[in-house]
Amino acid sequence: MGLSYLIEVTSYTFMGLFISRFGTTTLAGHQIAGNLGAVLYVTPLIGIASSTLVSQALGVQQYDDARSSRVTARYGVRAGARLRRDSDRRAAADH
């Protein structure tokens, strides 16, 4: 697992070094795309974490905690879906 992280970080670093030759605007675009990709990668993890919290609360019969976790998860997933939809629209408009 450590080797895969090493390869990922090293490749991202070298890509940034190669892109920096094109100028600061291109490098800034690369950074923005990387940040957006990270946000979109984390979005499904919100659903996984919230389903775990809800399941744990239901398992010990704490229904109020399950409801509050469900509501929090719903807002998180909606925000992630909204980000994804907006980024898809921007990508379609650029082409």
Image: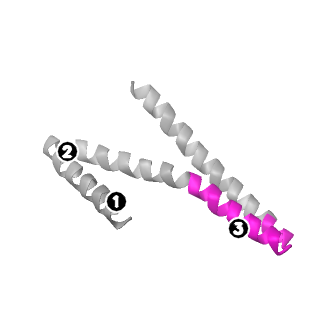
Q: Secondary structure at mark 3?
A: helix
Q: Pointers 1 and 2 in contact (CB under 8 A)?
A: no
Residue where numbered disc 2 is placed: 19
Decide if residue 12 is on the left or right side of residue 42: left
- The image shows residue 51 at horizontal and vertical percentages of 70, 60
Which image quadrant is residue 33 in? top left
Q: Nearer the viewer, mark 1 or mark 3?
A: 1
Task: Compute the Cα span from label 1 to label 2.
Answer: 22 Å
Dot placed on the residue nearer the N-terminal end, 1 or 3: 1
Say if the magenta span includes residue 9.
Answer: no
Dot placed on the residue nearer the N-terminal end, 1 or 2: 1
Residue where numbered disc 1 is placed: 4
- The image shows residue 22 at horizontal and vertical percentages of 16, 41
Decide if residue 49 is on the left or right side of residue 54: left
At horizontal 29% and vertical 62% (from top left) the residue drawn is: 6
Residue range of the region highlighted in magenta in the rendering: 44-66
Above or below: residue 30 compared with residue 54 = above
Q: Label for residue 53?
A: 3
